[in-house]
Image (tube, rainbow, N blue to C red):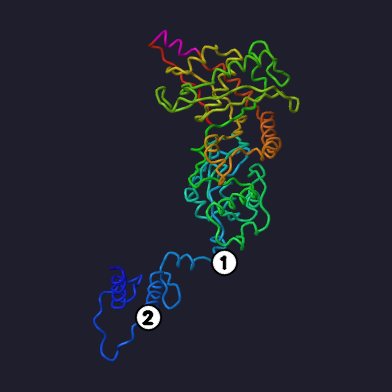
Amino acid sequence: MAAPGLRAAAGALRRACGAWSPRLGRRLLRSPPMAGNVQAPAPVGAAREQDRKARSGWQGGARVWEDAEQQAKKLRSGPDGELRRKLPKRKIVLLVAYSGKGYHGMQRNVGSSQFKTIEDDLVSALVRSGCIPENHGEDMRKMSFQRCARTDKGVSAAGQVVSLKVWLIDDILEKINSHLPPHIRILGCAPHGSALFQPNPRHRSPDLVELKQVMTLLCNKAGLKRVTGGFNSKNKCDARTYFYMLPTFAFAHKDHDVQDESYRLSAETLLRVNRLLACYKGTHNFHNFTSQKGPREASARRYVLDMFCEEPFVRDSMEFAVIKVKGQSFMTHQIRKMVGLVVAIVKGYAPESVLERSWGEAKVDVPKAPGLGLVLERVHFEKYNQRFGNDGLHEPLDWSQEEAGVTAFKEQHIYPTIISTERHERSMAQWLSTLPVHDFNATAHAAACPDAKVPSPPGDSD
């Protein structure tokens, strides 16, 4: 057979050419050794061992590291840097609750310290707690940061979800919350003890599935939710649920009912409010409910799954009601204008037919309710949960275990802020006084008189 001959030839060629070097590659054929310097050829087994070590980068029994970048990292890092590199860094999601009063929305405005946002305080807490390096705080793309919804100025959230990559340090949630103001919280319980993040010495070579299951267990104990590596909280979110809390005197008729705190919502009025809110369900063109959207833009069409008003309740001698709306996504000011138009109809300033006209191509003057009562309550990941929630490596994002913490935060920070602000600043009462200025029949007049000019809605800075 030819195989033994090939092996002998390969062995002779290796002895003639020398061992392979990872830095120089294979050496060229060398000239025969000079007389007096002849050395006995190494045994075949020793030559193979030498060649194996050379291929793996070993020279003289010591591994030669030639990665300059890794050497530079070692030189730059101190004891803290060494510890950070040993900690696992994973893509996780955090459940965030906050009161938006005094903030210019959720999303961070990099380079602008004049308008403070929720993410300014959140990123600062992440850096100070040691979850992310400082340069990631300056460039949030480095930690793959994404939020489910960009809440507007003054808008609160009881169930905002953000996704990012962090170091899984001990007591991660407690450390983050310790650097946050009380009206911003990461909901959940933190792990205890560094042993949670130490490998089990009896499992020296666990397979990939076991490692992922261990990481999922650690995240569960930390109050975190571990997600897939490419998870994006905004793109993976199927729907969002908001609620709008307002004093019920906003539904008092302009001609008959009292317009103060003594008003109580009747059952008949509540039925009418819910009948009007149900008209929003389905897919409609909401270009009149936002700014800078044309009537023929595809992005102006939005799908609303449900919208209704709950039973009213009394707080501090003032009656309030909560309107809940669930939809795939919402545009800027869309929910506030949806509420504002229904209020204008119930109070008698606008006819019910304006709802149908507002979904047409004509421009309709739609009032925008104050931002104080708007709260992001929950985000939904149904499709993600169906695909990854039960695969044994990840877990569904349902947040049912944190429901008690969400309710407590609303009772402690969100509801009191809305009630006290409404009492002292009377934002709803002041906005209601502007409703007579709106011309809800402008489009009807314009249709009858094509040369007539449709008045612009009054300015309302957010």
Task: Tell me if 455 is positioned left or right of 317 in this view.
Answer: left
Kindly tell me whether residue 58 is visible in this rendering: yes
Q: Amino acid at mark 2?
A: Pro
Is residue 75 rendered magenta in the image?
no
For the residues labelled 2 and 1, say whether their Cβ atoms are less than 8 Å apart.
Answer: no
The residue where tag 1 is placed is 79
Where's the C terminus, which quadrant? top right
**Residue drawn 49% across the image and 19% down it:** 365
* The magenta segment: 441-449
Kindly tell me whether residue 101 is visible in this rendering: no
What percent of the width, then of the height, locates residue 253? 64, 13
Quadrant of residue 295 within the rendered picture: top left
* Residue 383 sits above or below residue 432 on the image: below
**Residue drawn 57% across the image and 58% down it:** 87
Quadrant of residue 240 within the rendered picture: top right
Quadrant of residue 151 within the rendered picture: top right
Name the front one of labels 2 and 1: 2
